[in-house]
Amino acid sequence: MPHATPDYYAHPTAILDEGCQIGRGSRIWHFCHVCAGADIGEDCNLGQNVFVADGVTLGRNVKVQNNVSLYGGVVCEDDVFLGPSVVFTNVKNPRSAVPRKGPGQYQTTYLEQGVTIGANATIVCGTRLGRYAFVGAGSVVTHDVPAYALVYGTPARPQGWMSAYGHRLTFDQHGHATCPESAEKYELSPDGRAVRPLGHTTNKLPKISN
């Protein structure tokens, strides 16, 4: 029988090291390994064969698809989506013969609220992805990504802008765009390098039901 607590569910093949923190309502599936120093928030979902190392922090409602390894230094805010086989690193200059482990060696990779990363993308350590950034499948991210930006390619380059609901935005001559699903309005900066929502309409995102 699967083992469960009133707070979260874990499949019997999952390994949960003593000391890991797992939030209420989270689900951990087949062959996952969560290390002692990992901190997983509420309502998260870890698909099959996910590894979560010491020093990883996941916020609320983070969805991690199959075959993703999260290494020390990865931080995900709420509502992040990691597609199948996404790859993270935590050392930029690894050498087998040179020890580079532990505090002071691992670089932080920070994913702000609502980030989506497509299947098989690689995120090089030391980067920060802004709110609701969207990384296309198979991309290699080597630099910071602005909020609401759509990036893809190898290396990943800016290709446009995405709404919080995941729709590509088309801006008019005044620098304004509307999400076709939520009707949320966005504004493009005069230099074309940043996007911001007009008002607090990201609160329209559906709430998670427990």
Image (cartoon, grey):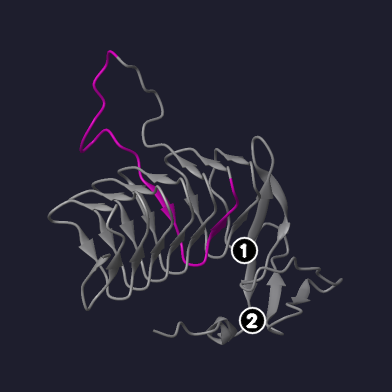
User: Residue lying farthest top?
Assistant: 97
Give whichever of discs 2 and 1 has the lower sequence position.
1
Prevalent SS, magenta region = loop
Task: Name the kind of residue labelled 2 in the image.
Answer: Leu
The quadrant of the rendering that contains the N terminus is bottom left
In front here: 199 or 44?
A: 44
Rendered location of residue 200, percent (x, y): 55, 85
The residue lying at 23 percent from left, 30 percent from top is 101
Q: Secondary structure at mark 2?
A: loop
Residue carrying label 2 = 198
In front here: 52 or 148?
A: 52
In front here: 107 or 63?
A: 63
Asked whether, in this view, residue 95 is left or right of residue 116, the answer is left
Residue carrying label 1 = 148
- The answer to which quarter of the image holds residue 146 is bottom right
Give the CA separation, mark 2 to mark 1.
13 Å
- The answer to which quarter of the image holds residue 90 is top left
Rendered location of residue 145, percent (x, y): 57, 51
- Magenta stretch: give its range: 97-119
Residue 55 within the segment the image draws in magenta: no
